Amino acid sequence: MTFSTGITGIQNMAPELPVQASEDLLSTPMFNLIHSFGVDLHHAESYIGKTTRMSRFERLSTDGGQLDGSGIDPAAEVPVRTDIDATMEIYAKSIVTNEQVVLWENSKTLTKFTALLGQWLREKEDLLMRDLFASSVSYINATGGLNGDQPSNISLNDVNNIENILLGNDARSMLTSLEATLKFATGGVRDAFIALANTNLAADLQKVQGVLLKSAYPTQEGIRPEEYCSISRFRFFVSSKAARTPGISLKGNTVYTIPMYGLEAAAKIEQNNYTAVIGYRPPWVVSAVAQNSQLYAKFAIARAITNQNWISGLNVTTFQPS
Amino acid sequence: MAFTIVSQGTFTQPATAVNQIIPLPSGADYFVTTNLTQMATTQGTGRVVRGEWYGGGLTAVNDGLRWKKTNSTSAINIDKFSTSTASNGFTYVTSFPAPQAALTGTTITQANGAVASVTNTYSEGDTVVIYNAVGMEQISGMTFTISSVTGSQFTLLGLDSSGFAAAATAFSVRRVNQFTPVEPSFLYVTKVSQAVGAQVTVSQANSVYLGQKLEFTVPASFGMVQLNNFYQPQSKPIVVTSIVDAYNFTINIDTTNYTAFAFPASSGSPTVQLFATVAPAGQSTQFNPITGVQTGYNFTNIPFHTGIFIPYMYVPAGAQSPGGSAADVIVWQAYKMETGTINAPVPS
């Protein structure tokens, strides 16, 4: 015996609102911001042009200088000043929202978009500093790796060569040492220079002789999440957006650029009141019928390599072509 | 208004027409060029008088609609730049361009002003990266400005390869952007003389300025390591004292007794250290209180600044291209949806 199928189930009685938002938004992807924290911060004032000049006196000669008792003075020396100029530039981004979005589709859009614009500010700034490092610094091709490419994959010899260059140029290390503790399988980390690498190099970094992965540091306190390892006198920070140029190695593989530097090698200059501006233009301003509102973010930045002596770096390829 | 002109302008091609880069701060959904000069003439071989580009992925790279006069009349034919016979069309660039697809060349000569043979569509003054130069691996990976460009070869005026052991018998080359993301940029050094006030040659044209300060990085494989900063008295940066020509300049260093500068042998690659480079280190600004003359000031090129504005429209030159040929007057207009895109317009 069968009954009629007048059953009211999920097939014909789905919820009136078939979807619901979960309690919170998922994370917006963001890459590691590694290109700004190691540079000097300077400030530019308003009303006096868009070029910021940073000046340095070169050290005096240590040749001669002995008085011989004759009463004749040693020759005076004319100090030499080096001027490094940087041009202020403004970057901006905006989001226009139609009132129908808020009316029918979504809530708290201003809050969400403000967060997005804030993330854009920092990401854009990071990439601008990356471009400075990639464009305006001399790099040495790694040759100590065994992948047969030019440049080769990274090796300890290559890292030590850059340390020689920086030390030979009297560069100062930037990061303080991490003292060894009695924790098992950990070791001390010397005061160090900074190295910035692409995440595609992570596998190669692990293979470099003498590498100390972050997990083996004596402490994790105060260590940035972007840090990956320590090799020789350098602590490596990684980002998926770190510099690379596809297809130009001897074998046609991607070449990665690793800036390696110490104190006062590069600078980021902020314009007063323009470090990070986020604003809102209401609908009656943006739209003739008051339907579109606008959020915007803008910031001003100038950037410069302030001392080429204290920055160097490596061009590398990966052991396995990437 | 939802669809409006956001920017427009004109340019006149010089005696040797050049590719144009037109910054578009708001981007573009539609871009059009009109060749006013050719609109008013008829040529034996019909010219392109109008070019159109649509955004949203509707127009392929190096393409667009080509409005072309037929031979010797003003009758118009319309097709795409990619249609046979193909000519260069528009390229809309929204992020810093990666190196273009590789071309495979046959030889690079041993000459002062080495000549590279490769079938190409490059233009005078383009910038290229050469790699895998068989027999001349010491230059593999270097960036060059090219000149005397024909469809089958170009010259590297910034490279004197006459002292190399052999010519290159094969190589790969990619065109790259003329400017780096930030200028001034580091440069490849190809020659340094042994002289009072040494003369330096770099591989790219018009990249160094009078009064600029520089720091050299010369690996031992190139000989003249004394140019490296840590060998210099007081570690002072080196100053550019004169500009000889597009590729050559002199510096305030007496290199007479320095080790000779020379490229390593090709056979040393890949283990030999490359390259000899020079990086910008500021400028030497001086004021003479007697004459009241300031020297070394350059507020345009020496300060660190963005190399190229993005986004931009690349408008190639040529009688069959939107940029036109010698002396042509071109009007361009960029249109932009006020909100939305050409694929997803909002109600208006």
Image (tube, coloured by chain):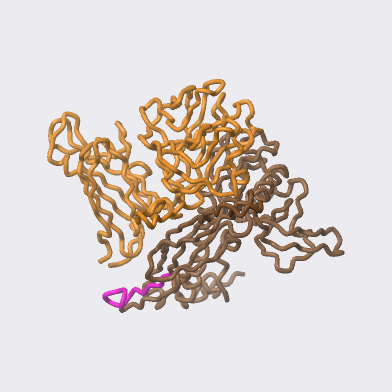
Chain colours: A brown, B orange
The residue shown at (43%, 27%) is B113
> As rendered, which of B33 and B241 lies closer to the eye?
B241
On screen, residue A124 above or below A308:
below
Name the quadrant of the N terminus of chain B: bottom left
> As rendered, which of A76 and A142 lies closer to the eye?
A76
Most distant residue in the front direction: A70
> As rendered, which of A187 and A320 lies closer to the eye?
A187
Q: Position of residue B76 (x, y in %)?
A: 17, 39
On the question of residue B221 being in view, the answer is: yes
Q: Image quarter for residue B44? A: top left
Based on the picture, tell me whether residue A290 belongs to the magenta stretch. yes
The residue shown at (64%, 33%) is B272
Would residue B2 be found to the left or right of residue B221 on screen? Answer: left
Would residue A167 be found to the left or right of residue B179 on screen? Answer: right
Q: Position of residue A94 (x, y in %)?
A: 40, 67
On screen, residue B70 above or below A108:
above
On the question of residue B309 being in view, the answer is: no
> As rendered, which of B95 and B165 lies closer to the eye?
B165
Q: Position of residue B195 (x, y in %)?
A: 51, 33
Based on the picture, tell me whether residue A86 belongs to the magenta stretch. no
Would residue A123 be found to the left or right of residue A91 on screen? Answer: right
Name the quadrant of the C terminus of chain B: bottom left
Q: Position of residue B282 (x, y in %)?
A: 48, 52
On screen, residue B291 above or below B105:
below
Q: Which residues are magenta?
A: A285-297
